[in-house]
Amino acid sequence: MSQDSVRVEKAALETAREPNPVLAVLRSSVGRNAGLVVALLLICIVGSITAGSRFADWDNATTILRLAAVTGVVSIGMTFVIIGGGIDLSVGAIVALSSVWCTTVATQELAQDTSWVWMVVVALLVGSACGLVNGLLIAYGGIVPFIMTLAMLASARGLAEIISDKKTQIVNVPGFDDFFDRDVLGIDVQIWLFALVSAAGWVLLNRTTFGRRTVAVGGNPEAARLAGINVKRHTVYLYVLIGFCCGIAALMLVAKTTTGSSTHGTLLELDAIAAVVIGGTLLTGGRGTIVGTVLGVLIFSTITNIFILNNRSFSEQSLFKGAIIVAAVLLQQRLASRSST
């Protein structure tokens, strides 16, 4: 990589200098994440007051983490795409297609004759292939990410319905459920998977050239191109990455429900984007953290858990979550306008 490329990437990572050191800390990633921790603690206090011992219980804590696991894995991939200046509305449909394809009769017969690992391979390949199609048509076809992924949403969901004939496909492969539906050190393996994907995402974003280029591409694509970064190729990589995450999420859903279905992952894209935005990632690209996304997912899951414990309806949950998303975006715009002045 050229010296110019290094300088541009470093410049993309720099934040606007703030003369007031206190405000500088509050506007840094550390300050934003500390604010999310405080918000999560306040939500937990509300949960303890309204739901009592039913909320403040270890079993309920693991329930919240299990609730967050599938959305969290997809949100990690979504964080990379949004930091890179894109967006993906098709993640829920890709999860559904991956779950259906890895549980077809042909795939399950192959897995029964050889190994259940084939189901894993098929789900990851289908998810990655969908991401590859999205990336190629966005980067080299010039289609706007919003439109392309909206088209993929409709196509993938439709293909999943055709393959499954709109029927639920039961999993009958020995070993698959045993691996994905068990505890390790007393913690559900799906929570471990969420933790591993989050840790890998943090390393990839903060300790590799791929992560620095993602920030550079999202911050200023033209400057990144002039610095020698292949912006189009990198964009394809980002969509393949989120497709791969969708494959993992599909396997987790299949293990949790022991089925593959074209209805899996419905509205998952909204939860993932909301968690990323609440976590402090700019929708315009160029800034975001994995830690913030994880906290955003936990905040959303905790709120959902509190609503369930208090017997509140799904409609009320959706209304409240929508208000939180609007508040998060308004706060982002306010901070961005202050930084630019």
Image: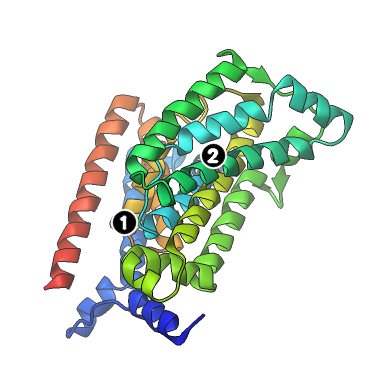
Q: In this view of the protein, which residue sits in the foreground, 341 or 48? A: 341
The reply to whether residue 172 is visible in this rendering is no
Label 2, on which residue?
130
Residue 1: x and y in percent read 52, 80
Residue most toward the right? Answer: 113
Q: Amino acid at mark 1?
A: Ala
Q: Position of residue 179 (x, y in %)?
A: 75, 40
- Residue at (34% x, 38% y) in the render: 147
Q: Which residue occupies 45% across, 34% down?
A: 152
Neighbor class of circle 1 (other Cα within 10 Å; few <14, some 14-19, many 20+) is some
**Quarter of the image where one finds residue 254:** top right
On screen, 279 above or below 211? above
Which label is found at residue 57?
none
Residue 175 is situated, as x and y percent measured from the top left of the image, at: 81, 35
Q: Which residue occupies 49% across, 49% down?
A: 239
Question: Please, what secondary structure does the residue beneath circle 1 have?
Answer: helix
Relative to 40, is 163 above or below?
Answer: above
Please state, as top left, top right, bottom left or bottom right, where the C terminus lies in the image.
bottom left
**Number of callouts:** 2
Secondary structure under badge 2?
helix
Q: Which residue is under mark 1?
A: 39
Residue 274: x and y, percent? 34, 45
Within-10-Å neighbours for mark 2: few <14, some 14–19, many 20+:
many
Q: Nearer the viewer, residue 336 or 210?
A: 210
Instruction: Locate residue 283 relative to residue 103 in the image: left or right.
Output: left
Q: Earlier in the sequence, mark 1 or mark 2?
A: 1
**Mark 1 → mark 2, Cα distance in angstroms:** 36 Å
Type of amino acid under label 2: Cys
